[in-house]
Amino acid sequence: MTDKVEIAENPNTPVGLLTKLATDKSWDVRRRVAANPNTPVELLTELATDEDESVRGGVAKNPNTPVELLIKLATDEDAVARGGVARNPNTPIELLIKLATDEHVYVRSGVARNPNTPVELLIKLATDEDADVRSGVARNPNTPVGLLTKLATDKWWDVRGRVAANPNTPVELLTKLATDEHGYVRHGVAENPNAPKK
């Protein structure tokens, strides 16, 4: 089984072999084929109707999935597929705006993490009741400094830790976060390339 999984996720696997593995009885093998950047669009289209939500989610996350298929998967009954669309860098902004109001936290956090999410939407998501969504905003490379500053005072350590690790967090804020009570936050500062050396 492990061999099939490794072959299915290898970006150098030939299309013919991916086509064969796309019908494997293991959902995990099919999911890896669905997420493989070498999987052709025709096969992605087939896998988008797979009975397993993880397989459909793999298609939704695949950077080669065409927009028409992303639009279809954005209405999938399962949050794994909708969340995959929310995380896909090719998802149109109009679709991200719609998914930002999804009832499931996995979907909203996917929108918050997407590098194409507009700043206005990040501002809205930064006030989400769920910490996973706010954490997604804090880790987004396009989150403006003012919003990072606000999130640096969040009550949840994961949110503050994501701010600490964000490459756009200014030195002054990193200095403040370096004294945070939670080790995860301090670790984020230590790993940040912009952190002061002393």
Image (cartoon, helix red, strand yellow):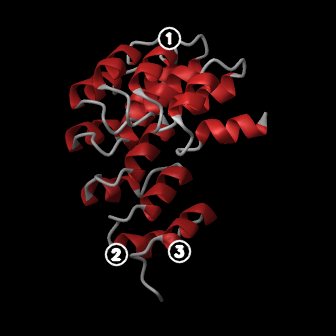
Q: Nearer the viewer, mark 1 or mark 3?
A: 1
Residue sticking out furthest to the bottom: 198
Residue bearing the label numbered 1: 49
* Residue 63 shows in the view: yes
Q: Which mark is residue 74?
A: none
Q: Quadrant for the N terminus, please.
A: top right
Q: Nearer the viewer, residue 190 or 6?
A: 6
Q: Amino acid at mark 2?
A: Glu
Q: Which picture quadrant has residue 52?
A: top right
Q: Circle 3: is it few (<14), some (14-19), or many (20+) Cα within 10 Å?
A: some
Task: Specify which label sits upstream in the sequence, 2 or 1.
Answer: 1
Look at the numbered disc 1 and give the secondary structure of its residue. Answer: loop
- Residue at 40 percent of width and 61 percent of height: 166
Circle 2 sits on which residue? Answer: 172
Is residue 123 toward the left or the right of residue 178 in the image? Answer: left
The reply to whether discs 1 and 3 touch (Cβ–Cβ < 8 Å) is: no
Q: Quadrant of residue 76?
A: top left
Q: Is residue 141 above or below residue 67?
A: below
For the residue pair 45 and 167, the one nearer the viewer reads as 45
The alpha-carbon separation of the residues under discs 2 and 1 comes to 49 Å
Amino acid residing under circle 3:
Ala
Nearest to viewer (mark 2 / mark 1): 1
Which quadrant would residue 123 be assigned to in this image?
A: top left
Q: Give the mark nearest the N terminus, 2 or 3.
A: 2
Q: Position of residue 110 (x, y in %)?
A: 43, 35
**Residue at numbered disc 3:** 190
Please tell me whether residue 181 is drawn above or below residue 51 in the rendered image.
below
In the image, which is nearer the foreground, mark 2 or mark 3? 3
The answer to whether any part of residue 107 appears in the image is no
Q: Secondary structure at mark 2?
A: helix
